[in-house]
Image: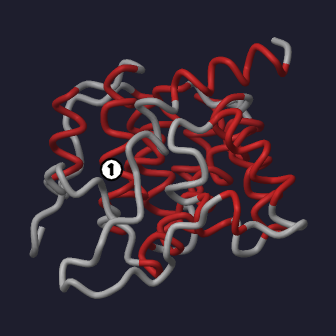
Amino acid sequence: MKRETLIGIIALAMAGGWLGGVVTAPSATGREPRFPQLTIDQLNEKQKPLADQIVKVSSVGIGGPYNLMLRSPVFGQKMFDLLYYLRWQTSVPQKLNEFAILIIGRQWRSQVEWFAHAPLAIKAGLSADIVAELKANKRPANMSPEEAAVYDFVTELTSKKAVSDDTFNRTKQLLGEQQVVDLSAVSGTYVSLAMLLAMAEQSIPPDKEEPFKPGE
C-alpha cells in the first residue's frame, strides 16, 4: 500500500482513534495544565516540520500527545515515525495489536489510551466481553488461542519483566517471529505514551466520562 493511501487511512481513523478528541484538558483540581496547548504560531523552526506532518494526519491538529512530543521535536519525529509503523504497517493483526495496547492502557489506568483504543479494538473484532473483563482487571474468558497468547505474553513481559519459555514458544508458534518482535515493540511504545500522558496529567475531553473511576 502506498504511503499516500496510508496517510488517508490514518486521517480517517484518527477521527475516532488514539488522537481523536484527545485534548489538553484542565486538571481536575483546577490547576493550569502542565503543558499548555501549543499553537502553530508558537512553533520554532525545529518544531514546524514535524507539525506540518502531524496536521496532515491528525484530527486534532497538534493536540493530544503531539502537544507533548513537539516539546522535543527530534524525539517527536522519531516517535511519530515509530507510531506510523506500529499502527499501520505492523505485522500484528489489528485486533491483536489493539488488544495489546488496551492491556497496557489498563495496567497504567491510562484514561486517554483506553478512551481512544477500546472502540478501535471492538471495531477490529475484539469481543466487547473481553474488553469489559480486561477493564475490570480480570483475565478475559473465552479468548481465542491467539488472543490468550497476546494477553499472557504482554502481561508477563510488562509485569514480570520476562516471558516464560511456555508463553514465548506458544506465542511464537501462533504468531511467528516478526509478530513477537512487533508485539513487544508496540507494548513498550504504549508504556512510553502512557508515561508521557501521566506526567503531563492529560485526560480525555472534559465533556466525556473517564473510563476508570477512582479505585478501579
Q: Quadrant of residue 85?
A: top right
> For the residue labelled by badge 1, is the local secondary structure a helix, a strand or a loop?
helix
Viewer-side residue, 45 vs 211: 45
Viewer-side residue, 20 vs 161: 20
For label 1, the residue is 114
Viewer-side residue, 29 vs 131: 29
Viewer-side residue, 197 vs 53: 53
Q: Residue 102 appears at what percent x and percent y?
A: 38, 48
Q: Residue 119 appears at what percent x and percent y?
A: 31, 31
Q: Residue 143 appears at what percent x and percent y?
A: 30, 30
The reply, left or right, for residue 7 in relation to residue 87 is: right
Position of residue 45 relative to residue 112, above or below, is below
The reply, left or right, for residue 204 in relation to residue 179 is: left
Amino acid type at image mark 1: Trp
Residue in view at x 55 percent, y 60 percent:
65
Position of residue 41 relative to residue 103, above or below, is below
Q: Quadrant of residue 66?
A: bottom right
The reply, left or right, for residue 188 in relation to residue 126 is: right
Of the 4 image quadrants, the one containing the C terminus is bottom left
Residue in view at x 47 percent, y 45 percent:
100
Residue in view at x 69 percent, y 46 percent:
83
Around disc 1, counting alpha carbons within 10 Å, would you say few (fewer than 14), some (14 to 19), or many (20 or more)?
many
Of the 4 image quadrants, the one containing the N terminus is top right
